[in-house]
Image (tube, grey):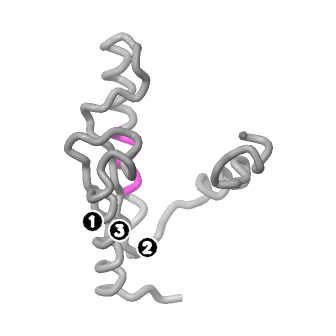
Amino acid sequence: MLTDSSKNEERLDMHASALAAHQLTSLGNKPVIVLTHSPRFCMVPGLSEPIAVRLEDATQRMQQQFLSLSTNSRQNVAARAGHGLPHEDPAFVVNGILQGVAAVRRHPLRR
């Protein structure tokens, strides 16, 4: 999957995508809506409690770091849904998308 884009669902070139992501430092004031799974979600079932808590804490912190990409950002944290947000809480995802559309309409993007 990492080296052959035909073997992942999104057909992403993972290497090129990672390089582009690491180069991104700011989106200015473009609207950013971060949708985050519930902090009660266990990323890797079967991990010991201390490790699972540390992993989830790190994951939540990384999600919060996305907020620093824009001066116009917000984070929505799911109450119960886990990593599969679109399947576990589709209304949460739809609401986040609608918030993003509304934010763009309030602050049209300049090219």
Residue 95 in the image, given as x and y percentages of width and height: 27, 65
Instruction: Indicate which disc, 1 or 2, sits on the residue closer to the N terminus.
Output: 2
* Relative to 109, residue 33 above or below: above
Q: CA distance from mark 3 to mark 1?
A: 5 Å
x 39%, y 36%: residue: 59
x 39%, y 26%: residue: 55
Instruction: Indicate which disc, 3 or 2, sits on the residue closer to the N terminus.
Output: 2
Q: What amino acid type should be assigned to the residue bearing mark 2? A: Gly
Picture quarter with the C terminus: bottom right
> Quick check: is 2 in the magenta stretch?
no
SS of the residue under disc 1: helix
Q: Residues within 10 Å of mark 1 (few under 14, many from 20)?
A: few
Q: Residues within 10 Å of mark 3 (few under 14, many from 20)?
A: some
> Which residue position holds label 3?
97
Residue 44 in the image, given as x and y percentages of width and height: 43, 23
Residue 23 in the image, given as x and y percentages of width and height: 61, 58
Q: In terms of image quadrants, where is residue 51?
A: top left
Q: What amino acid type should be assigned to the residue bearing mark 3? A: Ile
**Which contiguous range is marked in magenta?**
60-67
Task: Identify the disc placed on residue 95.
Answer: 1
Q: What amino acid type should be assigned to the residue bearing mark 1? A: Asn
Picture quarter with the N terminus: top right
Q: Please give left or right for residue 11 compared with residue 99 in the image.
A: right
- For this orientation, the residue located farthest to the left is 79
> Which residue position holds label 2?
28
x 27%, y 57%: residue: 92
* Relative to 29, residue 40 above or below: above
